Amino acid sequence: MASLSTLSNMYELSLALYMVVFLVALERAEPDSLVENRLENIINTLTQSCYNYTCRGIFETHKLMFSLQMTLRIMDGEGNLDMNQLDIFLKGNLSLEKCKEKQPADWISDAGWHDMQRLTAEVPSCGALIPDLKSDINKWKDWYDMDAPESHPIPGGYDDKLSPLERMLVLRCFRVDRIVPSIIKFVMKEMGAEYVAPPVLDFMLIFKDSTPLVPVVFVLSPGIGRCLQSQPHRPVASKNTHGHP
């Protein structure tokens, strides 16, 4: 939540504000006589509360980015995230040295072929990707031509060999235009469908999440007044803040 401030200076979330969300989650979490179950209920409720609370205060264009960031940070905390693979996903191949070997088909982009060199060199499970590609180029071309290749098995049985993040790395080399849909599938796989479906703005929920010391500030974009006149009961955006004017 705190890292959102790098996207916009409007996204300043204090520790004191987080504690408000935390204490509310403690109250809402289902009780259980077993400590392990009680802790699991608190974690699940707090995670969902943080997601819902934060999504109400950020622009629509940043919500999927927040879902991905939240997923990656939780995976990292649990020891399930390979930081080198994440670096490949975010940056690709930054080497200035181009591959001397020409790509085996003209439908593979130069950038994708360049990224594939780093992927095969640094991710063991993808080490045989280039030989497999060359040995069955037509099957890979059929997969490449699909409208939504992220929803279909990767040729060569790679779906069974690769983790969800590694599958996105392979897709990135072939169809970078399908990365956003693949991120949605990735978050759903790791966290659940509710973490790619931002909550509908509800004034009563906002009121329940606020306290006398936590004001609710509504931020209206320029020109939104005309929309509010035509739809007076439809909220546009809201943000809970703490310690801000």
Image (cartoon, helix red, strand yellow):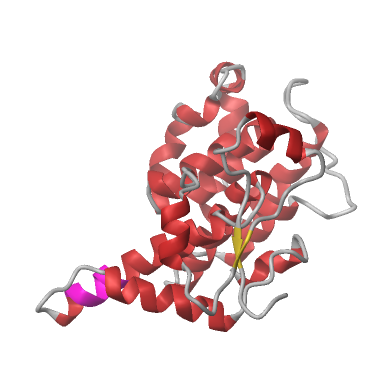
Q: Nearest the camera: 119 or 180? A: 180
Q: In this rendering, would 92 be left or right of 185? A: right
Residue 41 image point, x, y percent:
25, 69
Q: In this rendering, would 116 be left or right of 31? A: right
Asked whether residue 10 is drawn in magenta, I would say no
- The vertical placement of 78 against 172, above or below, is below
Residue 85 image point, x, y percent:
60, 58
**Looking at the magenta stretch, what is its main secondary structure?**
helix
Q: Nearest the camera: 80 or 185? A: 185
Question: Count the marks: how many?
Answer: 0
Please report the residue visible at 31 percent of the width from the left and 76 percent of the height from the top. 26
Please report the residue visible at 63 percent of the width from the left and 49 percent of the height from the top. 237
Q: Is residue 177 visible?
A: yes
Where on the picture, by quarter, is residue 134?
Answer: top right
Residue 179 image point, x, y percent:
62, 38
Q: Quadrant of the C terminus?
A: bottom right
The range drawn in magenta is 37-42
Q: Nearest the camera: 121 or 45? A: 45
Residue 129 image point, x, y percent:
58, 39
Where on the picture, by quarter, is residue 30?
Answer: bottom left
- The vertical placement of 187 against 19, above or below, is above
Q: In this rendering, would 173 be left or right of 184? A: right
Q: Quadrant of the N terminus?
A: bottom right
Q: Is residue 162 visible?
A: no
Please report the residue visible at 62 percent of the width from the left and 32 percent of the height from the top. 178
Q: Nearest the camera: 164 or 108? A: 164
Furthest-right residue in this view: 96
